[in-house]
Amino acid sequence: MSSLMEAVRAGRTAEVVSLLDGMTDAERRSFFPELKTLRKELRADQWTAQARSAYPTLHAAGTACQTGAAGVASWLAASDMRWWPAPPAVLIDLLGDRSPGWLGDVAHRVAERPTSSRVPYELMAGLVRLSGCPVPTTEAYVHGWVEHIGHGWQRGDTVLDRLRKDPHLAQLTAALFETNDIGSRLAWTADEGPNSWTEALATLTTEGVLDRKATVDACLARLLRGGPAADHRVFLRMLRALALTRDEEREHTAEWLALAADAASVVAAHAQSVLASLALDRELTTRQLAEMSGAVLFRPEKKLVRAQLVLLGKVLVRDASAADELLRAAAQAFGHEDSDVQERALKLVERHAGKVGLDETHEELASAAAQLIPTLRMRAAQSLQASSEMSEPAPYEEVLPPAPEPVRLAPAPESAEELTEEVGALLASDGDVAAFERALDGLVRHAYHDRDGLLEALDPVVARRWWDGREQAYAYSADDYFTRHHGLINAAHGLELLLATLRGKVLTATLHKAVQRGTVTSDCGHSPLARAFEARIWEVAYRIRTEPLPFLLSTPTWGTGLLEPDELVARLDAYRRLGARVSEADFAQALLRVRRGDRASAEAAAERAAALGTAEGTRLAGWLTTGAPTVPVFHRQTSGDRILVASGEIAEFQGDFPAGFRPLGRPVSFARDHWHCWHWGDGMRGHWLALLPEQRELVAVRMLRELSAVAVDDTRGDAAVLPRLAESGGEAGDAVHLAVAYGLGARHPEDRLAAVDALLVLAAGGQLDAARMGADLGQLVRRGAVKPSRLVESARTAAATGANATIWGMLRHTLPVLLADLAADGGTGAAAGGATGRATGGATSGATAPPRGLADLLAIAAECAERTGARDELPHLARAADRRGSSRLVAQARRLRSALAAA
C-alpha cells in the first residue's frame, strides 16, 4: 500500500495534502481508482470510527486526484461525503493551482446542486473568489449566502455591515427575491435594527447602494408569486420598510390590484389599504375601483370585504357619478356566505340607489338581490323595486351524494407475474382491503397449483427483504420479526409472513405455535380485532407449509368485506369435490363475513349448504338460519371530556369459533379495559371493518376512543376511516354517530372533511339519525370535547354541498343544548360577549358567556332554515334573540327566529 493511501485510511489530512502537493496531475490521477475502491468499502459501513476518521481525508484526496470539472463537482457534493467532509479551506487549497475557467466551472456546478446536498457556502464562495467568475444565483448559493451573512457575524459586526462589504450584493439581492422558501431563513435574524434583513436592505436602498426601482419591483413581484407564510411576512415587512412614495404607489397600481385580488390575507390587506388611499385621493379611476371591489368582495375574509364596502361608501358620498359602476360591484357581495356582509352590502346599495342613472343598473341590482337570504331578499324587493316574484322562495330540494355502490372484488391474479406486481405494490403502500384480499387469495391459489413458479416470480420482490438474505446481519431472526412484541402490525406485515413462509425463512414450529397460541401480546381494547385478523394469516401460512389450501373461503365478494352466501356455498362444494380440509380460521372469517341481513337469500343458501352433507355445510346452514347478526346491549360511558360507548357480551361468537375469534364477543368497557397501546396507525382500521362487515357498530365501539382524539387531543389522520365506516353494513348506532360527531369537531381540515363525507354517506343511505347526531354534538360541545368553531366549518361545508335539510335537522338538536346555557339576563354586557364568548368577563352578574362560534352556528342554522322553509320552535332561541344589544349572536338568533316563524 502506498504512503498516500495509508495516510488516507488513517485520516491524516495534513500529510495527504503535503503528499499531493508534490505530485503531478498524472500521478494524482493514478491514485483515483484506489480512492474509489476505498470509498466503496467505507460506504458499506460508514458509521464506524474508522470511516468517520477516513472520510474527510478521502473527500480531500478524491477532489485533488481528478481533473474533470464534472467529476470533481460530483465528488464534492456526494451524499456519502456530506456527513464528514473535508474543511472548505483544505479543498480550496488543493484546487488553488487549477485554471480560473476550470474553477469557475466547478463553482457553478456545485452551486447548481439542490440545497439538500449541503455544499458549504465557504467552498462555493472560495471557488468564485479564486476564479473571478460571475457569482452563481442558484437556490443553494443564495441560501448559503443568507445563512453566512445572517449567522456569521463577529462582535461589533451586523448584517448591514456585512452586506455593505459584499462585492456581489446587487446580484445576490436580486436573486434573493426569486429564491424559494427563503423567508424563514431571513426571519432568523432580528426583526428590527441593523441585524434585520428587511431594514438592512431598506437602508442600503435608501443610501443608493441598491437600485430603488429594481428593489421595489422585485419585492412586489415576489409577493405576487405567493409562497409560504414566512415569505409573505418577510417581504411585506421589507416593502413597508422601503416606505414607498405616493408616486411609486400610483406607478404600481396594477400590482396592488392583483395583490388585493389573489394574495394571502395579510398582503391583500396591505394592498387594499394602499388602493383605498389612492381612491380617496382621486388617484384611482372608477373602473379600477370597481375592478378591485369585484375581486375583494369575492374573497372569504370578512374583514377585507367589510373594509371594501366602507371604502365604496366613502367614494359614493363624494362622487355620485360613480354610482352605476360601483353599486354593480357592491352587489356582488349579495352572494357572500355571511349574512352580515349581505346586509351591509344591501344597506350600501339602498343608501345610494337614488344616484343610479341607468335602467340597466337598476335591473342588474334587482337581479343580484336574488342571492340574498330570504329576509333581505324580501326587503330588497321593496327597496330596489324588484319583481315581487323575487321574494318568493323556490321549492327546496335536498341534494345528497348518491349512496355509494359496493364494488365487487376482482378475481385473484391469474398469472404469478401479475400477482407479484400487486404484492410488491402492497408491501410498499399497504393498500386497501380489496387489494389485500385479492393478493392473499392469489398467494394461496398459486402456492397450491405451482409453488415453484410462484417462488420464481416472487424473487425480485422477496430478494429486497432483509429476512431473505443469506447472511444474518440482524440481532433477531425472521421468526422473531413476525412474533416478537406485537405480532403482525399491519396487512403488509401479514403478506411478508406468507412470503417468508414460502421461502422457508420461518420455522414450521413457529407457525404451529402461532396458530395454537397466537402472537398478540397486548390485551388492549383493540386486541380482539387484531387477534382475529392475525389468526387467519397465521393459519394460512401454516397450511402453505404443511397442507396448502386450494383457495380461501373467506375472500369477500365486495370491497367492504361482505361475502355473498351463494359464493360461500359454491366454495364449500369445491372443497368437498377436491377433498380439501377446511382451515378453521378461514371458515370462521367466512362466517363473520357472509351476508345474513338479506333473509331470503340467506335461507335459500342455507338449504343448498345443508345439502352438501359436510360438517361445514351443516354449520353454515345453521348460521344462515339464525337470523340477522346478534346485536349486543350498548350503553354510554363518560371519560373526562369524552362520551364513549360500552357493549355487552355476544354469545354467538363463542362456542365453535376458534380461540382467535372469541374475544370479538367480549364486553367492551372503557373503565376496565386498557386503551394505551401500539394500535396507533389507521392502516388496519379498514381491515378491522372488513372482519365484521354487517356489524360496524362492534368495530366502531373499539375504535371510538382513538377517533375521539381528533377532537379532544388534536391528533391527525385518525378520522380517515370514517367514510369507510359509513359505507360498511349493519346498524349505525351510538358508536358510529359519536365517531362521526368527533370527526366533525376535529382539529385538522382533512379529518373534518372525512367526517363530512361520512355524514353525507349516512344521510344518503337513510342511516343518519340527525336528532341523535345533533344532541351528541351539543353534549360534546358542552363538555369541551368539540370546539364550536370547528363544528362551524364542518356544518358549513356539508350545507354548501346542498344538504341543508340534513344540517338543519342536526343543528336543531345541537343549538338548544348550547342556548340553554346562556343566562336569562339580556343585558348589554352579555350581548356584547356574543361575538367572542369572553368579551364581558364578569361584567354582568350571573351571565354565562356564549361559547365561541355559537353565533356562526346560529347563522348556518338560519341559512339552512331559510333555504328549506323549516317551521319549528327551537327551545331557548327566544331568550337569545331577546338579549339586549346588536351583537352577531343576537342578530343571528333573531334571524333564525324570523326564519322559523315566517308564514
Image: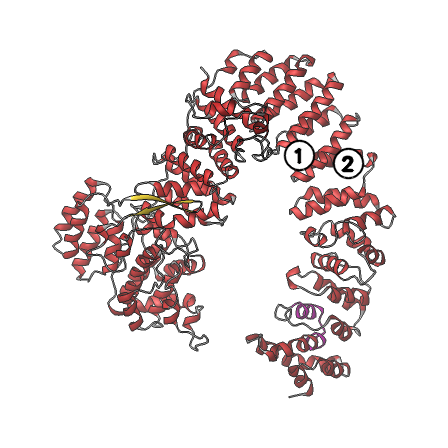
Verify whether residue 71 appears in magenta: yes
Foreground residue, 722 or 616?
A: 722
Q: Which mark is residue 252?
A: 2
Residue 614, compared with residue 828, is above or below; it is below
On screen, residue 7 versus residue 716, left or right, reads right
Residue 97, compared with residue 22, is above or below; it is above
On screen, residue 211 versus residue 603, left or right, reads right
Q: In the rendered image, which quarter contains the C terminus? A: top left
Q: Which mark is residue 261?
A: 1
Foreground residue, 62 or 871?
A: 871
Q: Label 1 to label 2, Cα distance in Å? A: 15 Å
Amino acid at dot 2: His
The magenta span reads 61-77
The residue at the point 67 percent across, 61 percent down is 113
Q: Are marks 1 and 2 in contact (CB under 8 Å)?
A: no
Percent x, y for residue 565?
22, 47
Verify whether residue 237 appears in magenta: no
Q: Which mark is residue 31?
A: none
Percent x, y for residue 213?
82, 43
Residue 414 visible from this viewpoint = no
Circle 1: element type? helix
Q: In the rendered image, which quarter contains the N terminus? A: bottom right
Residue 469, compared with residue 158, is above or below; it is below
Percent x, y for residue 494?
36, 62
Most distant residue in the right direction: 207
